[in-house]
Image (cartoon, grey):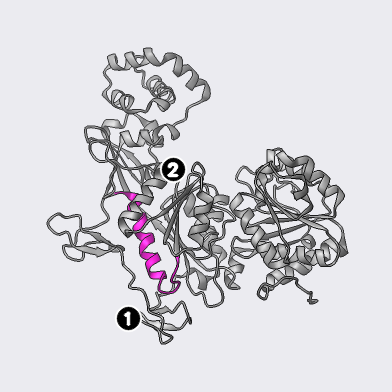
Amino acid sequence: MKKIKLAGNVPTPRDWQTECTYKALQWLTKTKKDKRFLINAAPGTGKTICASWIAANLIDMGEIEKVIVIAPRSEVVDQWAVEFKQVTGKEMIRITGSDTKPNEFDSNLCSTWSAISGLLEAYQITCKEKKTLVICDEHHHAAISAAWGTGAYGAFEEAKYIIVLTGTPYRSDEKETAWLRFGDDGKISHPMEGSYEITYGEAVDLGYCRPITFHRHEGNLKVVDKQGTLVAEVSGEDGTRLSDEYSTLPSLQKSLNYYQTACTIPYKNDGVTVNYEHSYQKTMLEAGIAKLEDLQDRVHNAGGLVIAPSIPVANYMAELLKRITKENVSVVHYEEKGSEKRIKDFRNSNRKWIVSVGMISEGVDIKRLRVLVYLPKAQTELSFRQSMGRVVRSLGVNDDTRAYVVMPTHKIFEEFARRVENEMSPGQRKDKKKKRNKICPVCETECLISQTSCDCGYEFPNRKKSYKKCLDDNCGVLNPISADECQSCGLSFKQEYIITLDAAARMGVIVRGSDVSEENTRNSEIMYRGLREDILKNGNQNMINIFKIIPEEQIFEFISFGMKHAKAKNINT
């Protein structure tokens, strides 16, 4: 391959970045068949740096006068500004809203996708008056016929060049995205000469990303009513089995599915006190904590990420982590101000855990993350791979650690995980034996686990290990957090997890799993009072129990579900 001069003051580029840069320059400035170049590279491979190098060379060649980057969120915008300057030596102004001053458009810009519509005219003028390169990061956001895709078309139609960056090019809703060609089969048909692709498996073999291990976390959850009567047994392997007393409610079986139940916060018998001592989420976290503590012998500041399905579950899991590790835990979500600052603070700290709801799923680069506890709201392959990308980034050629994902035994996630595992070569799929040495973070010397200091003088911290107490009151022995049974009395830690029907309804599990149409919901609002009286008079205790504990905000949808059941069973309503 012809050698090219790469601008910037960053370390020697990876081979794929050099090849991609040369191919992009050839396509855009020599072939000139299309002004768009596609980079489809797995999360963690270094797309930001590669695109910045392409931009640096186009600037050096006089092909462009300015660069505009579009990224999914403000945290990623900040990362772009830092890495772009690192490569090109040029400043990049950050835009995350519509309050940007006109003179700021004279500079290189990095904007969120959501800010495009408010600045449409300014972008149009800029692209028309100056030779502009537009870099679209996480391009799956730009769906044709959707707001962001329409805005991108209108804003950057006059751009001289467009570089499309993606690690997950296909949207979960299968909509086509701006600037890319799609065939009749729905697959991207952009010319091979105008694109560069590197899969996750290739990135692992080349050492750009670390291999990943998926820990399938099983749990046997029991759902009980207010009287403690068994409603259903739920597990990832066996599905949902209703008890005889509740077997007349077949729709309840669908509602109480394993994944939604696993996302439910457990309460004690009083129905008010949150249960922090024993829960499915706690055992997920224990598995993640044990793995992270092992990895810290190799990467001293290794961190863990928890992706939660909702803010209440995020706060619950953060409190569990705090109780287990005795350390403060960062929580970031879309409703709380300052979340982006907390992400930055976590990136630059040695804190172990951060819990996120919709904040650290794509583009956010925290290289020290090694363990992911995955319990999200979204169940799409795009979201799965984006989240996986947070923990596969490599620290360099000497980084011999693996990425670990602790996830529920859920058939959807199982399918996604198998696809990822099949991308890796056979030798990379197996988790090799744990190394018995630890690495000095100062001189990177291999030291024995028992050593308290390195020959260079570094004193290893007396790192606290996490333990769990035996649940037998007569024993109470502390055990390693990864233990499956008590080392003293032999009591199994793999016990059943109790979820009350009240808690399941409170978290929306029951309603979310039911087939309720909008029309039925409207009708149920009208019939609410009469139906309530009829059910109470009818005396069907199963329906009465469920009716009493559904929260007010979900009651109308659940009535529709109940009416559907009543009609099917010829119950007099």
Report x, y in % for residue 40: 68, 59
- Say whether residue 570 is magenta: no
Residue stretch in magenta: 279-302
> Given the image, on which type of amino acid does mark 2 rest?
Ile
The quadrant in which the C terminus is found is top left
Circle 1/circle 2 CB separation < 8 Å:
no
Outermost residue to the left: 474
Report x, y in % for residue 419: 54, 58
> Given the image, on which type of amino acid does mark 1 rest?
Ser
- Which numbered disc covers residue 311? 2
Secondary-structure class at tag 1: loop
Q: Report whether 57 appears left or right of 100.
A: right
Magenta region's main secondary structure?
A: helix
Q: Report whether 361 appears left or right of 101.
A: left
Question: Badge 1: how crowded within 10 Å, few (<14), some, or many (20+)?
Answer: few
Q: How many marks?
A: 2
What residue is shown with label 1? 450
Mark 2 or mark 1, which is nearer the start of the sequence?
Answer: 2
Q: Nearer the viewer, residue 371 or 252?
A: 371
- The answer to whether residue 237 is seen in the rendering is no
Above or below, comparing residue 240 to residue 41 in the picture: above
Outermost residue to the bottom: 455
Question: Badge 2: how crowded within 10 Å, few (<14), some, or many (20+)?
Answer: some
Residue ID at (70%, 67%) = 87
Secondary-structure class at tag 2: helix
Report x, y in % for residue 159: 82, 51
Residue ID at (39%, 25%) = 552
Residue ID at (52%, 53%) = 341
